[in-house]
Image: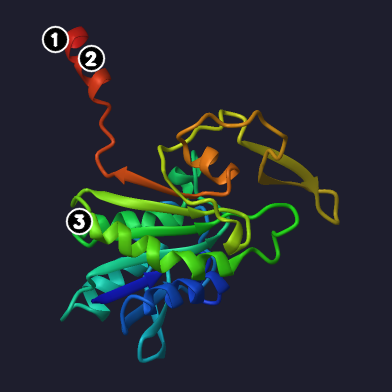
Amino acid sequence: MRILVTNDDGIHAPGLDICADIARALSDDVWIVAPETDQSGVAHSLSLNDPLRLRKINAHRFAVKGTPTDCVVMGVRHILAEKIPDLILSGVNRGRNVAEDITYSGTIAAAMEGTILGIPSVALSLSFGANTRQNPFWDTCIEHGPDVVRKILATKMPGNVLVNVNFPDCAPTDVKGIAVTAQGHRGPELLKIEARHDGRGHPYFWIAYDRRERPAPGGGTDLAALAENKISVTPLRLDLTDQPFMTQLAQTLK
């Protein structure tokens, strides 16, 4: 089995090597194609107005000056064009990708692009907390990741579905199992603008997360699974059509 590994944290991110270790537990034919720099939050963007610069690091490791989506296209259509991958693993992202994160995440987008290209794809992310931000539980991914991916592949994934896996913020021995979940919801207060001033007094702004405590999430979601120290596994469809509302619109607009 040929596996393509990518991420959105960049070619030097520790989670990329963790993802490669997970891949090597499944196969000895592992290739890495990742962004030259951190591309967190770029979602499913393509570099259409800039050339892609490709840097070969070694025989199986490449850096692309572009987005995670660019990396998947480069890997499948150029680097591995003669024998395309059988599986794409994206991650391991340092920080969870759940609820509304899915719409922003370059990690998810890389797996989405792999799915569009007809390749089974899994996104992998690791949650962290205030005390583990700098040193998240990478061992949890290494310990549980290969088995989770094997079980996902054994289900014969549908062609229009990718799988979003999130590991909880805990040691490997504290994981309480695997939960198959729905995408959660945090609400419209997720993001905020922080206003600051530079050394000359000129204003500038940062987009930031609102870190206020929120009520415990409802059961059955990715948020709830991580709160219970479970590995969250969420299938995501490429087709974003809302069928019930489509039917309602068809009746209203005919």
Q: Can residue 46 be seen here?
A: no
> Tag 1: residue type?
Lys
Question: In what element is the residue under mark 1?
Answer: loop
**Residue at the disc numbered 2:** 249
Q: Which residue is drawn at 47% across and 64% down?
A: 144
| Disc 1 + disc 2, Cβ < 8 Å | no
Dividing the picture into quadrants, the one containing residue 2 is bottom left
Mark-to-mark CA distance, 3 and 1: 39 Å
Pick whichever of labels 3 and 1 is earlier in the sequence: 3
**Residue at the disc numbered 3:** 156
Q: Residue 183 carries which label?
A: none
Question: In what element is the residue under mark 2?
Answer: helix
Which of pointers 1 and 2 indicates the residue nearer the eye? 2
Q: Residue at x 32, y 54 (%)?
A: 112
Instruction: Look at the picture and state if 47 lies above or below 208.
Output: below
Mark 2 packing: few (<14 Cα in 10 Å), some, or many (20+)?
Answer: few
Pick whichever of labels 2 and 3 is earlier in the sequence: 3
Picture coordinates of residue 195, whole percent (x, y) = 76, 41
Mark 1 packing: few (<14 Cα in 10 Å), some, or many (20+)?
Answer: few
Mark-to-mark CA distance, 1 and 2: 8 Å
**Residue at the disc numbered 1:** 254
